[in-house]
Image: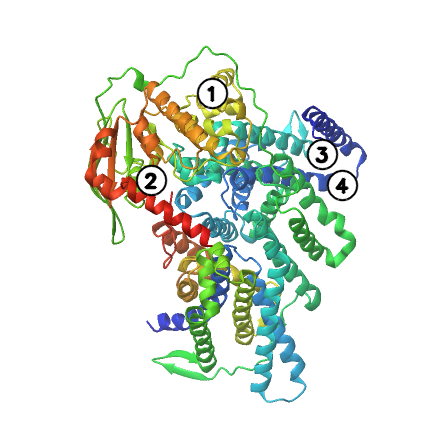
Amino acid sequence: MQAFFQFTVEGLTIGAFYALVALGYTMVYGIIRLINFAHGDVFMVGAFLGWTVLVTLAGMHLPMAIGLLVAFAVALIGSGALGVLIDRVAYQPLLSAPRLSILITALGVSLALENGVLLIYGPGFLTYPHLLSSAGFAIDGVQVSYAQTVMFVISLLLMVALYLFVQHTFIGTAMRALAVDQDAARLMGIDVERIIQITFFVGSFLAAAAGVMEGLYYTQISFFMGFLLGLRAFTAAVLGGIGNIPGAMAGGLLIGLLESYGAGYISSRWTDVFVFLVLIGVLVVKPTGLFGERVVERM
Amino acid sequence: MAADPAMRAATTRMLLVAIAAGAIVLPLAASDYVIDVAITILSYGILGLGLNIVVGYAGLLDLGYAAFFAIGAYTTALLETLLHVPFWATLPPSLALAAVSGIIIGYPTLRLRSDYLAIVTLGFGEIVRIIATNLDITGGPNGIYGIDPPILFGLQFTSPALLYGLAWVFLLLVILFSFRLSASRLGRAWISIREDETAAEAIGVPTLRVKLLAYVMGALVGGFGGSLFAARFGAIDPTGFTYLQSITFLIVVVLGGMGSMPGVLLGAVIVGGLPEALRFLALWREFGFAIGLIVLMLVRPQGLWPARIARRVQLPEDDAGDLSFAGAEAKWGETLLEVKDLGRDFGGVRAVRGVSFTVHRGEILSIIGPNGAGKTTVFNCLTGVIRPSRGEIVFRGQRLGRRAPHRVVALGLSRTFQGIRLFPNMTAYQNVLVGMDPHHRVSLVGEILGLPSARRDAQEHLGTCRRLLQFVGLEEEAGRRAGDLPYGDQRRLEIARALGAKPELLLLDEPAAGMNPTEKTALMGLIRGIRDLGVTVALIEHDMMLVMGVSDRVLVMDHGALIAAGPPAAIQRNERVIDAYLGNDTEAEETAGTEEEALWES
């Protein structure tokens, strides 16, 4: 039983990262029906931006808190801007084109980001500065580090903030309107292109937060890290019901737990098989994901 | 581009001759390196065409296509190394296993929306790769090596030139297969579900089976390509079957042009050749490829060589056959359809509440009533598009129950739609053929092999198609894109498509909407003509001139209930109907007056 709770702690930590990234997939899908394949790589770029800032500041003997704050600020805003740029260059011109062509530019952007980072930073792993102590507390022998707790809380706060943003602000309302009917939203005077850009900014911003935290937590980053995490986060978004924000959060945590239990009880080599089988099983029983709604078609 | 079809055909012929000549000369003149790149391009061509069946024809997203490729490769490798089966004998089991895995992946995903397919197929691809990596029998991460090359008449296929020839043979077979498929009724059904799945199902296309067959056919080609891959390299390992590989195949298809065979082959040349051409970029090569991909997609979003609609059509001219319908011999006046206490709720809204009526064979029945009265919901329940919450529908003595829409059509009940739902990117005659196809006898295998019986049957089929188009007055428009037809023509084409299913009862949902008075008069004639063929007609319509002029009986619905039924003359005098729907003349004039005033003020 102790092992079970230990796996749960690990699963929730990694699941929070998945949830943050899954939100970006689900938001973009919700408003323009695009599976943004480059999103996992934006997460990766966020981790690299954070690393660059931390390494640059390392020689300046600033207090750790300030260093982290600057790193987060640069990574989050920089990635957000990157998200907007990607949207402007590669997606906006194709919004009315056949749907698969925009999917291919998304794949192109993904490849370009991976190879761009590879060219700048090289193919090996980079090591994040060891800033997090492994100190923590134990409940009944289940180890929980302070760092895990803080990161989990930060992730939850970001998710709650996003939820409030989408539900209670004018821009959030516009996003939801866009998700329902883009043409009607445009006719109501909503600046559709700008709302889409804001969506990309917010999604990339959250992904970068996960990127920096993942770097700090696992201390190793590589140009390829976005692929696997992006895959899991996308799975999470679908599991929760793609287009549904609370669904993405729940899906992320669920995938984290599944992965952790899978690795703990079965074998880490079979984790992905386990995760995908659960996903397929859920979709067969409930084709719109756990929290997705049925779409009724008019004739 | 040559506008003249004859000139275009000549250009195509010259291009083909040039390609054939180049292909033959290549192994004699080029270095082994160039031949190797050429084999890679040919392999991409094979797999691209296979994936094109799934993505291009049927419009189903597949991000795990490398799984079938892997299954073919591993089957051949294992049979050769463990059981010493010669290469050629491994092909049937390889194809069979790939096809079975096509069913395994296809079956659970059939009811999913296309976007969910992306992740499920991706997951399937990953599962196959992980299994190959983790099992001992597949050699784990190291894979399988020492696979013997194919041997034919004592000739070992080890040299690049011979492998190159083998790859060409494989590709040509796949081209032929793909071409025959696209021209078959299955090919048409795929395009129809890509265009509008709900409409396809509602006019009789068994959409689930058709989609499953897309996976199976795609998987067959994938397995075929996999076997070739194993033979070519003599060694395989899981890194050859990653998600990135699946993505690469998808790029071949979309970059070239979905659903277009020349496009896919061009895509294969670019995806296989461009990275080689970019070697001068050294480390920047992959990056350059990514940027090139984005730019190409931005410049040509529809692909480099998009699919064209097959406009040319030679409909047989003979007038020997006649339009024949089963209903013609049956007894007029007997009960054809019986609806008992039909009800349907949407959430808290009771759209239809306890409607009962019968339709007699040979009559023309109209259902009228204000908007939101539940008329279309009744039609949707009858055709199985939505399930009734209560009640019973008996058609030709059989309870419809929970039958899928295409099976209702098979029983002899077909329909048109209130908002036109043709397949806009198919020609008029193809639209009608899709409606006719589910009742087509010839076997698919016959069509793919091009058997004489299949050809004869296809000719006959086209003849019926022509007569249907002629019947609705669209013979001249047969080769036009359905989406380009004027509104009234689209309505009539929908009727022809519905008649293609040889219905005994035809449901028309607002057939006159958007038609001008001349067209409406012609439509009345057409509706009577349909009845004279022996087809019973039920229609929903707001145009009273048409309803009163054409109907034998009229049903009136309001707020989900039936409020009156009877011959047109009686309905026109019925007080409840006048209150609920028709209104009296003075009221109508007043409303018209206010509308006019409002118009002037603004």
* Sequence-first disc among 1 and 3: 3
Q: Secondary structure at mark 2?
A: loop
Q: Secondary structure at mark 4?
A: helix
Q: Residue at x 67, y 87 (%)?
A: A60
Q: How many residues crowd mark 3 within 10 Å: few (<14), some (14–19), many (20+)?
A: few
In the rendered structure, find residue B1 and report the number of the disc placed on it.
3
In whole angstroms, how far apart are the C-alphas of marks 1 and 2? 29 Å
Residue under circle 1? B470
What amino acid does circle 4 point to? Val
Q: Residue B164 at what x, y percent from top left?
A: 69, 34
Q: Do the dots labelled 1 and 2 sit on one chain?
A: yes
Residue under circle 4? B34
In the rendered structure, find residue B385 and report the number of the disc placed on it.
2
Q: Residue at x 50, y 62 (%)?
A: A189
What amino acid does circle 1 point to? Gln
* Sequence-first disc among 3 and 4: 3
